[in-house]
Amino acid sequence: MLLVPFEFGKMWETANKANQVFNNTKKDDDAVNLAVIEKEGGAVYCLPRNNVYVVADATDSKFKVSLDMNIPSELRDRFVCAVYDGNTKVSGSDKMFPAAVGQAVEIEITSPSGAVVKEYEIRAGYDANADTLLDESEVIRFLVYTRKDINGTPVDEKKYATVKGISSAMYQANYGVISGFVDLSAVRLGVPHAHALLSRFLKGDFQGIDQTLQPSMVSENEEFDAFKNATPGDSCFSEWLTHHSGAWFADDGKVSDFPRLTWLGNSPFSRFLERLRPRK
């Protein structure tokens, strides 16, 4: 019997490390009217944090994630992982872990052609027979995280890393629905400020937006660190905004072309936001 420390490290979207689970901050929304499964500090969570959500790469329709495990350095090159669809191993998905500590294994999963959200598990184990394949007898249920229940009691759970893959067809279908809703006259006229922001988020520009709602200044080359702890003067939104900004982040969590939009204090948009600000 092989007894070694074997823990989940991190998993992220290969092309964008800022979209990762087990990063320095939590990326799941606080639980609202849902069953709370975890409590940490003053925050409660209703979603397991061993999931990473990715969209299929538009160039080859594959889900691409990188996974690192906390494995003793002298054994790393004997550990192998594979993708499972339910309890069935995906053929050809076996990958050996790199020998270097801190170097992740890159995993590619072919996306279904239909408009679906598909869930896969990444299982791993010690390659006892040295055939570079993960056999059922070699799979180890590794420690994903130690969570606390609603009463604050630590609960060790052994789970697999989970990939929630959104197929290209599903992404495009939902994008079309949302874009169509945002462009409705009722939305454009009824909530013009929200319409302006959503249009920018979806389309990347303010084309077709009333000039009075457009930013006073636009800079597309700001620097931003998604992993930096929020301090006075820094953005407190770093734990929520990563690749969703439309920018691609380097492995260290930094980006040099982050878009910054500025509305001056005398603009109609700024005056609208000022009216919404809570008063003491």
Image: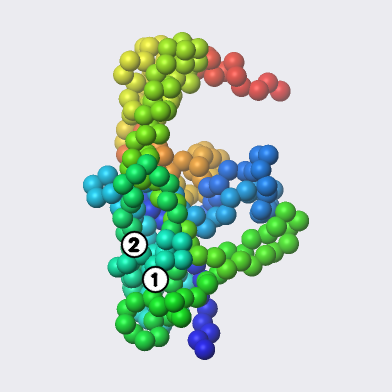
Residue at position x 37%, y 57% in the image? 65
| Residue 55 in the figure: left or right of residue 30 | left
Q: Residues within 10 Å of mark 1 (few under 14, many from 20)?
A: many
Residue at position x 23%, y 47% in the image? 59
- Of residues 203 and 122, the one nearer the viewer is 122
- Of residues 132 and 30, the one nearer the viewer is 132
Badge 2 marks a residue whose secondary structure is strand
Residue 253 seen by the camera: no
**Residue 105, quarter of picture:** bottom left
Q: Amino acid at mark 2?
A: Ile
Residue 151 seen by the camera: yes
Badge 1 marks a residue whose secondary structure is strand
| Residue 112 in the figure: left or right of residue 85 | left
Residue at position x 35%, y 79% in the image? 77
Establish if 76 lies above or below 36: below
Establish if 97 lies above or below 64: below
Earlier sequence position, callout 2 versus callout 1:
1
Q: Residues within 10 Å of mark 2 (few under 14, many from 20)?
A: many
Residue at position x 45%, y 68% in the image? 123
Counting from the top left corner in percent of width and height, residue 239 is at: 51, 45
Counting from the top left corner in percent of width and height, residue 97 is at: 36, 73
Tell me, yes or no, whether the two marked residues, 2 and 1, touch with CB atoms within 8 Å.
yes
- Checking the image for residue 39, the label placed there is none
- Looking at this rendering, what residue extends furthest in the left direction? 59
Locate the C terminus by quadrant: top right
Counting from the top left corner in percent of width and height, residue 86 is at: 46, 61
Establish if 6 lies above or below 167: below
Residue designated by label 1: 81
- Of residues 184 and 99, the one nearer the viewer is 184
Q: Amino acid at mark 1?
A: Cys
Counting from the top left corner in percent of width and height, residue 174 is at: 40, 34
- Checking the image for residue 107, the label placed there is 2
